[in-house]
Image (cartoon, helix red, strand yellow):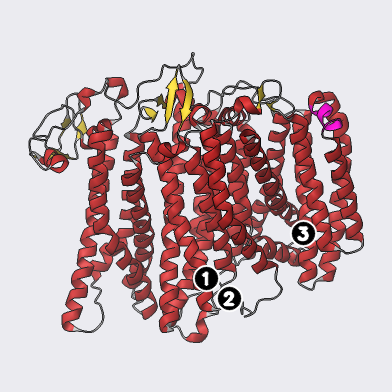
């Protein structure tokens, strides 16, 4: 047996058309790709805001206190779009994939219920944190922000547990296509959960940190080198730089996990066609009939990465029937782009460390040479690229399965006609929401410019809501 | 027993969504009807002030209901979502437009932006409960068969009972919002706004009564099983709803705004529970009972236990949220 707990017999003849299936996949992929960015900011930005607020209260520094208020304002807008775009996903689970939910909804319901509780807590305390900013004493206000960070992280954990179940379906027994036994805890705590959840949560903090830092890197490049913009850059950039090396280690763990549990995904990600030892690591390349062409090969590279020895056997796509192979070029490129972006972020973190070390020797403030800032401005986009590519590896690499080895995407889709129309409608609404979100955030940043050296009296002039 | 507990918990979630989330939609309806930018400014400010801190938490009740339905009654979730995907997609888009536009309007300073986002917020506040109401009507009148998209994707929600459900949802949301806003205006020391909302509350309350009365005829012709349930087993709840609604109107006339809130909430909640009682034990009328659709006991136990533990954290948190903002003026007034 190559794949998981056995292939389920395909149900009676389906009426679904190819274009509707493509439309459903496109809609789900698009709305997930959109939501995942704001969701990551929703997990990471509250932590940054709390750090700035805490530092501001501790030192009385107006720059940090002002930063906290302005980040909170942006957080209010982003949390709203995150909440609604997340709700749509829960609808789409049923609107687009009723075949999945009708059969396995009960198996995978528990992590969603727990995620719901965590999200509820997050929404409650966000309401208090934002709207009671000037009603509560500063320290008590700071405390109301802590549940937001915890609940955001916990809800990310649960929702990724549910996704992990699609990669490693556990906790149920099928007999003649019917579920005869369910262990919801075993389903939720499946083996793919630990690497996937840790990888995702670290990614969330990196995306929020580097995106925020990038905004201030651009401002510093434009010559606004005052205390406010320096603080707005260094606080998130430092957090992102601290997380980056851990993420490389966790990413390695996640990939190594695949070699044991989901070899087809690793084979597609690394472009391995033939099972064997001494497998090279191929960077780039185009999928041909018998292997990647035009790629850069590092001899024995993959065998070394997977098992620390050139003799390690890596399972290739030849072990997978052609109809059950994921799309190699897409998964492989997404994987390589993610790794490249990850190492770029690691490099930027090392550069920051070096600047910091130099300052310890020479004194003065941390220097920000232009090349450093120019590359730092790219860390935000790079983190988003890594995020989206990593997500693509997870999702595309599981194709054609929706539940790995158990149910195909085709068997899960809603057979109702007209899904293509729904896709266009959703794209139009999301396009409008994207434009409006970017526009409103830019207005928030520019509407009330920050003075060169913000004073005590300036802080309260900036409304949080 | 376990199955009924899961159903009851889901229905409590639905009731909370109607009472809290519904009122937020209703507030958007009044925002729509508040007239020009100048004339409606005070009303819109009060609406924004009232729902701003709470709408996201209130919105989570919907997610709660969706997740309960798919966890505890997966085949029903699949049947409803696949057959009624058109109104549900439209409701989902309405939810996006309402939430995002509300946040955008609050962050905007120029009049044209506030108008654009405000119109989007208000219009979607009207359409979203309408579409959700049509879904309720489709389910209640037995138009959703089991299986994937086996029902008619058009007449499943474009039918007399669905239209009744949609209109009733909009009118009751508006009524709830107007009643809640009376007390908010009163507390903020705006008696003239409170009077205006009291008038709106009476008008929408009477409208809800008229729609409900007309609904008797509609249901008799279009959904005989539901009609039979409502006039027999669920009759006490129907009567309770009518009595609570009338009591609420009388309380409004006497300017007892806080008590009127309770009466209006009972009136709306009683209607939802009357629907449940009339249909029980059928989940998909004519085909699937609650017991047939229910998940395995292990799932129900795990979900209910998790919710029980969650409630220990959530209930005090919710109390803190409402208590923080239902208190009067801030201790440290913010210079805005």
Q: Nearer the viewer, residue A138 or A269?
A: A138
Q: Which dot marks residue B104?
A: none
Q: Nearer the viewer, mark 2 or mark 1?
A: 2
Compared across the picture, whether A109 is left or right of A190 comes to right
Residue at left offset 27%, top offset 47%:
A338
**Residue placed under numbered mark 3 in the picture:** B180
Find residue B330 and report its image quarter: bottom right
C-alpha gap between disc 3 and disc 1: 34 Å
**Residue placed under numbered mark 2 in the picture:** A136
Q: Decide whether residue B116 is among the magenta residues.
A: no
Q: Secondary structure at mark 1?
A: helix
Q: Decide whether residue B232 is among the magenta residues.
A: yes
Q: Nearer the viewer, residue B302 or A167?
A: B302
C-alpha gap between disc 2 and disc 1: 26 Å
Compared across the picture, whether A66 is left or right of A252 comes to right
Q: Which dot marks residue A447?
A: 1
Q: Residues within 10 Å of mark 2 (few under 14, many from 20)?
A: some
Residue A25, compared with residue A139, is above or below; it is above
Find residue A242 and report its image quarter: bottom left
Label 2 resides on the chain identified as: A
Quadrant in which the C terminus of chain B appears = bottom right
Q: Position of residue A146 (x, y in %)?
A: 47, 65
Q: Position of residue B52 (x, y in %)?
A: 64, 62
Label 1 resides on the chain identified as: A
> What are the residue bounds of the magenta stretch?
B226-233
């Amino acid at each position: 047996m190559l794949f998981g707990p056995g292939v389920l017999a395909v149900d009676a003849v389906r009426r679904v058309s190819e274009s509707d299936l493509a439309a459903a996949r496109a809609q789900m992929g698009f709305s997930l790709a959109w939501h995942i960015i704001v969701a990551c900011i929703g997990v990471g930005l509250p932590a940054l805001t709390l750090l700035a607020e805490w530092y501001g209260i501790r030192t009385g520094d107006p720059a940090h206190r002002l930063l906290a208020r302005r980040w909170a304002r942006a957080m209010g807008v982003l949390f709203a779009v995150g909440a609604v775009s997340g709700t749509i996903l829960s609808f789409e689970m049923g609107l687009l994939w009723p075949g999945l939910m009708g059969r396995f909804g009960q198996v995978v319901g528990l992590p969603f219920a727990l995620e719901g509780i965590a999200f509820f807590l997050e929404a409650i305390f966000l309401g208090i944190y934002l709207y009671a900013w000037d009603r509560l004493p500063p320290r008590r206000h700071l405390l109301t922000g802590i549940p937001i960070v915890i609940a955001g992280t916990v809800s990310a954990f649960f929702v990724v547990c549910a996704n992990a179940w699609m990669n490693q379906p556990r906790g149920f027994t099928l007999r003649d296509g019917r579920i005869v036994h369910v262990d919801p805890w075993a389903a939720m705590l499946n083996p793919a959960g630990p690497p996937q959840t840790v990888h995702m949560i670290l990614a969330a903090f990196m995306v929020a940190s580097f995106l925020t830092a990038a905004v201030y890197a651009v401002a510093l490049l434009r010559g606004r080198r005052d205390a406010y913009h320096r603080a707005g850059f260094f606080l998130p950039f430092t957090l992102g730089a601290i997380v980056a090396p851990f993420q490389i280690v966790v990413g390695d763990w996640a990939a190594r996990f695949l070699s044991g549990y989901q070899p087809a995904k690793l084979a597609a990600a690394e472009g391995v066609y033939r099972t064997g030892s001494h497998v090279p690591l191929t960077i780039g390349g185009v999928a041909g009939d018998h292997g990647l062409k035009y790629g850069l090969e590092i001899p024995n590279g993959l065998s070394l990465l997977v098992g620390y020895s050139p003799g390690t056997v890596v399972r290739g796509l030849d072990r997978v029937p052609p109809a059950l192979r994921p799309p190699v070029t897409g998964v492989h490129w997404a994987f390589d782009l993610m790794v490249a972006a990850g190492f770029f972020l690691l490099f930027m973190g090392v550069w920051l460390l070096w600047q910091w070390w130099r300052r310890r020797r020479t004194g003065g403030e941390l220097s920000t040479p232009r090349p450093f800032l120019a590359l730092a401005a790219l860390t935000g986009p790079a983190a988003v690229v890594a995020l989206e590519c990593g997500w693509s590896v997870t999702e595309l690499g599981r194709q054609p399965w929706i539940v790995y080895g158990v149910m195909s995407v085709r068997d899960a889709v809603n057979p109702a006609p007209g899904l293509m129309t729904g896709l266009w409608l959703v794209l139009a609404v999301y396009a409008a929401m994207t434009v409006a979100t970017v526009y409103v955030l830019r207005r928030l940043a520019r509407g009330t410019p920050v003075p060169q050296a913000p004073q005590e009296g300036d802080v309260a002039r900036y409304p949080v809501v | 027993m376990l199955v009924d507990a899961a159903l009851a918990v889901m229905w409590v979630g639905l009731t909370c969504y109607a009472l809290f989330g519904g009122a937020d939609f209703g507030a958007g309806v009044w925002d729509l009807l508040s007239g020009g930018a100048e004339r409606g400014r005070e009303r819109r400010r009060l609406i924004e002030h009232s729902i701003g801190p709470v709408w996201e938490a209130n919105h989570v009740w919907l997610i709660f209901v969706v997740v309960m339905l798919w966890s505890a009654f997966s085949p029903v979730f699949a049947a409803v979502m696949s057959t009624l995907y058109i109104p549900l997609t439209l409701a989902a888009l309405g939810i996006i437009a309402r939430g995002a536009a509300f946040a955008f309007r609050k962050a905007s300073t120029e009049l044209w932006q506030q108008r654009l986002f405000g119109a989007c917020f208000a219009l979607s506040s009207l359409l979203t409960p309408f579409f959700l109401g049509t879904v309720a009507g489709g389910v209640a009148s037995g138009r959703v068969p089991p299986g994937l998209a086996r029902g008619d994707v058009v007449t499943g929600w474009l039918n007399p009972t669905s239209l009744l459900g949609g209109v009733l949802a909009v009118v009751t949301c508006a009524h709830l919002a107007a009643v809640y806003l009376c007390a908010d205006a009163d507390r903020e020391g705006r008696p003239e706004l409170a009077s205006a909302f009291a008038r709106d509350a009476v008008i929408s309350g009477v409208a809800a009564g008229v729609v409900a009365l007309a609904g008797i005829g509609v249901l008799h012709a279009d959904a005989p099983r539901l009609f039979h349930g409502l006039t027999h087993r669920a009759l006490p709840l129907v009567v309770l709803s009518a009595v609570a609604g009338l009591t609420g109107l009388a309380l409004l006339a006497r300017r007892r705004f806080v008590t009127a809130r309770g009466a209006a909430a009972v009136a709306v909640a009683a209607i939802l529970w009357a629907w449940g009682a009339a249909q029980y034990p059928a989940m998909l009328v004519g085909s699937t009972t609650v017991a047939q659709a229910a998940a395995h006991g292990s799932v129900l136990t795990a979900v209910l236990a998790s919710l029980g533990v969650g409630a220990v954290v959530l209930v005090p948190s919710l109390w803190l949220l409402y208590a923080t903002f239902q208190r009067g003026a801030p201790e440290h007034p913010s210079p805005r």
